[in-house]
Image (cartoon, rainbow, N blue to C red):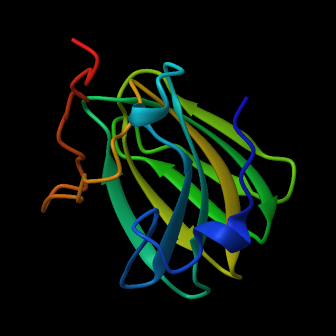
């Protein structure tokens, strides 16, 4: 069993931030459960481009309002508490925050915590080595 709190993750290597966003990585590949789980915040008035070409991501918005734009077809979706989106086709997308967004995110395959968005918003695929082998 794994039990963690966001307060114990804050300001550790599991707490990663960039301009206008912060991701608290609660479950990572090293936990060996087949997915990673994050609490992500995006600051009001910011716009972010993402393209997870190596991961499937599910996002549940628990706080804030904004829009999600699917760059693959131009569709714009309103985001509000209770919205969920699933990037099951590796869609290039943009998240625009009218107010601060707080989201719970699941990645498959799991991220290791060492990934950094490249110039296209992509996380590289890093496979966590099994230390027991």
Residue name at image x 49 percent, y 32 percent: 31
Q: With 83 as the anchor, is 108 left or right in this view?
A: left
Above or below residue 102? Residue 38 is above
Residue 122 in picture, x, y percent from top left: 23, 48
Q: With 110 as the anchor, is 77 left or right in this view?
A: right
**Residue at the extreme right of the image, as rendered:** 82
**Residue at the extreme top of the image, as rendered:** 133
| Front residue (pair 75, 114) | 114
Above or below residue 33? Residue 117 is below
Residue 65 in picture, x, y percent from top left: 75, 70
The quarter holding residue 13 reads: bottom left
Q: With 122 as the anchor, is 69 left or right in this view?
A: right
The quarter holding residue 79 reads: bottom right
Q: With 78 as the anchor, is 76 left or right in this view?
A: left
Above or below residue 97? Residue 110 is above
Residue 130 in picture, x, y percent from top left: 26, 20
| Front residue (pair 116, 127) | 127
Above or below residue 68? Residue 48 is below
Residue 119 in picture, x, y percent from top left: 12, 62
The quarter holding residue 33 reads: top right
**Residue at the extreme front of the image, as rendered:** 132
Name the image quarter holding the N terminus: top right
| Front residue (pair 28, 119) | 28
Residue name at image x 25 percent, y 32 percent: 53
Residue name at image x 58 percent, y 30 percent: 86
**Residue at the extreme left of the image, as rendered:** 119
């Amino acid at each position: 069993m794994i039990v963690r709190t966001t307060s114990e993750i804050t300001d550790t290597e599991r707490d990663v931030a960039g301009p206008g966003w912060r991701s608290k990585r609660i479950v990572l590949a090293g936990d060996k459960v087949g997915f990673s789980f994050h609490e992500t915040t995006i600051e009001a008035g910011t716009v972010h481009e993402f393209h997870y070409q190596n991961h499937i991501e599910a996002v549940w918005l628990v706080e804030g309002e904004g829009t999600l734009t699917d760059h693959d077809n131009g569709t714009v979706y309103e985001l509000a508490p209770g919205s969920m989106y699933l990037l099951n086709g590796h869609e290039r997308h943009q998240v625009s925050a009218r107010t601060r967004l707080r989201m719970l995110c699941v990645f498959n395959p799991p991220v290791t915590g060492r990934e950094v968005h490249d110039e296209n918003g992509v996380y590289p695929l890093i496979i966590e080595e099994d230390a027991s082998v």
